[in-house]
Amino acid sequence: MRVEQLMTREVVTVTPETTLKEVASLLAKHRISGVPVCDADGQVVGVVTEADILWKELGLRPGQGSLLERILDSAYGGDARITAVTAGDAMTSPAITVRPASTVARAAELMIDNGINRLPVVLDDRLVGIVARADLVRAFRRSDEEIEREIHDDVLVRTLWVDPARIEVDVDGGEVVVGGEVENRTTAELIEEYIRCVPGVTGVRSDLDWEIDDRARRTAAAANSLPRRF
């Protein structure tokens, strides 16, 4: 599954000059926790979130050094957010973004690795949508039939160019059992790994056979690629 299948296309945005008061009103009105900050050309230059606005709610002076300030400072940044007036002052920049054709697994990886809840979706450097953690959770709830269809159409046919007639796929409660025969061991291992990345899959058991065990050849190729010492 690709990000473009899940993303919200009508995105609430602000400019660097938008005041934090206006940002707060937009977040409350649309019941969202963050917005992309875009320049006049529609390019994403940052993201401003509820956490950025919390600094203003503290009513602290720079360097006051309260426990709450130190906690927020370690998580979100320094004194600049205390004195911020506009989205440009408070935003996190550069923004972490994702492309429409990226996989849902890649989007999830970016969110987890960077501790963020949403990703602006960009194409040719311009904002085309946004995807949030809630969107990824909805994808995980897909039916067994939808999961099986993606394994067939996306993993086997479009990604790995494997004849689906040679592969048997059974999905029950998100658990996938895949069997059949492929050309080599590498392909069998790739099929299993790609299936694990399909949203909604909770486990994979591979009963695949292969005509050629190319593991030894892969190992030799890897060894030959290592730099030699003279």
Image: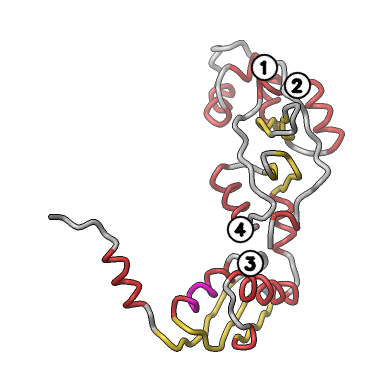
Q: Amino acid at mark 1?
A: Ala
According to the image, label 1 marks what residue? 84
What range of the chain is rendered magenta? 187-192
According to the image, label 3 marks what residue? 198
Q: Earlier in the sequence, mark 4 or mark 1?
A: 1
Q: Earlier in the sequence, mark 2 or mark 4?
A: 2
Image quarter for residue 194? bottom right
> Element type at marker 2?
helix
Find the distance from the CA under tag 2 to the CA under tag 4: 33 Å
Q: Amino acid at mark 2?
A: Leu
Residue 103 % position (x, y): 63, 58
Find the distance from the CA under tag 2 to the CA under tag 1: 8 Å
According to the image, label 2 marks what residue? 20
Q: Amino acid at mark 3?
A: Val
Residue 145 % position (x, y): 75, 77
Find the distance from the CA under tag 2 to the CA under tag 3: 39 Å
Could you tell me if residue 107 is visible in this image? yes
Tell whether 22 sits left or right of 144: right
Circle 4 Cα neighbour tier, 10 Å, few/some/many (<14 / 14–19 / ≥20): some
CB-based contact (under 8 Å), mark 2 and mark 3: no
Residue 133 % position (x, y): 69, 50
CB-based contact (under 8 Å), mark 2 and mark 1: yes
Find the distance from the CA under tag 3 to the CA under tag 4: 7 Å
> Is residue 6 shown above or below 95?
below
> Is residue 87 shown above or below 27?
above
Q: Nearer the viewer, mark 4 or mark 1?
A: 4
